[in-house]
Structure formats: structure tokens, C-alpha cells
Amino acid sequence: MRLKAIITACGIFFLFLAILPVVRPRHTESPGPAINPPSEGPITDEVTTRSHSLTLPTDNGTVSRDAHTIQTALPRTHETDALTRAAELMHLAMNNDSASLATILRELGNPDPAIRSAALQAVIQFGSRDAIPILRQDAEQTQDAGEKAQILAAMEFLKLPSLSEMMAHSAAAGEGKAVARPGD
């Protein structure tokens, strides 16, 4: 009796292990869109994008995330130009200066929708509320309902209080001081 239970449990366990790779979706590094590179050139895998970086597999198996490698590894096309500019904008988003923010905000008016989308992601990554008035102008001027919704969502995200603001608010509330809510 006990042996039957053990054999049955082991059989179920091994059956589960056999089915698991079939049922479970393959984990990919990036949930973002994938773009197949041209067939010529040194790249054999796909170029994938994320909201904050670009991943480009190279011949020797290393992974590069900079705009220069994208420019030199792939033949120049509209897609590679957009990917390069997106990488540059994300690099600027990591800076904490007004010149970088101004450059990112200028790209919100770019005629290429891919670059506008990358600029919007860079504005979100930058995290400055100084961008809200310009985002508001862009939302009023855009005709595309989907793009307008993304801009409005970015504005709402930027209005949210930061973690440090929330901690300061909690500390002040704990001391019994009357304070305004962060972001008001």
C-alpha cells in the first residue's frame, strides 16, 4: 500500500516535470517588442527593446546596451536610427540636469512616432514634474487617441509623490505636524 502511494507520487511528479516546459511560457529577457535585424551583417539574433535599455546580442555572445554598438553592428535603416535615438534618450534620462530634460522634451515633437514614444518613456524615466506643462501641450495638440492616452498617463505618473516625499510626509504626520499631501 505504502509502495503504491510512493510510486504514484513519483509518477505524478515526473509527469509534472515533463509537462512543465510545454505548458510554461519561455522566459524572455525583455517583455518589450522584438525587431528582427536585417539578414546581412554580424547579428544573428533579434534586437529587443525595453523601456529603459536596448539589448543587442553580438557575434561573440556578449550583450551590448549602447547606441554606438547599434550604429556600428547593423546597417543603417530607419529602425536602427530610431533604436539608436531611443538609446540616446534613455541615456539622457539617467542624467539629472535640465539640459538633458530639454533635449528629451524636444524629441516629443519629432515626426517619427517611435522616437516620440521613446522620448515619452525617457520623460517618465527622468521623473521630473517640470515636464508636465509640455506634456499637457503635447496632449492637446496630438490627434492620435492612443498617443494622447499615453501622454496623459505619463502626466498622471509624474504627478505621483516620490518615495522620499512620502517618507517625509509620513515622518511629519507622525510628529503631529499638519502638512499638505505631497503633490498638492
Image (tube, rainbow, N blue to C red):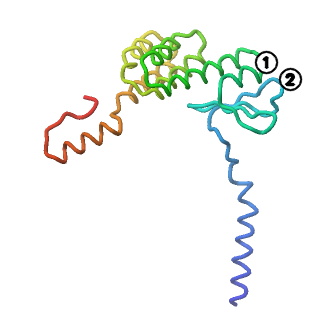
Amino acid marked by disc 2 = Glu
Q: Please tell me the numbered disc located at residue 75.
A: 1
Q: Please tell me the numbered disc located at residue 40.
A: 2
- The residue drawn where x is 48% and y is 29% is 125
Residue 10 on image: x %, y %: 72, 76
Label 2: how many Cα within 10 Å (few below 14, some 14–19, many 20+): few
88 or 36: which is nearer to us?
88
Residue 39 on image: x %, y %: 85, 25
- The residue drawn where x is 19% and y is 48% is 174
Amino acid marked by disc 1 = Pro
Q: Are marks 1 and 2 in contact (CB under 8 Å)?
A: yes
Residue 48 on image: x %, y %: 68, 32
Label 1: how many Cα within 10 Å (few below 14, some 14–19, many 20+): some
- The residue drawn where x is 23% and y is 45% is 171
Residue 121 on image: x %, y %: 52, 25
In which quadrant of the rendered view does residue 129 lie? top left
Counting the numbered discs, the total is 2
In which quadrant of the rendered view does residue 38 lie? top right
Q: Which quarter shows the N terminus? A: bottom right
In which quadrant of the rendered view does residue 49 lie? top right
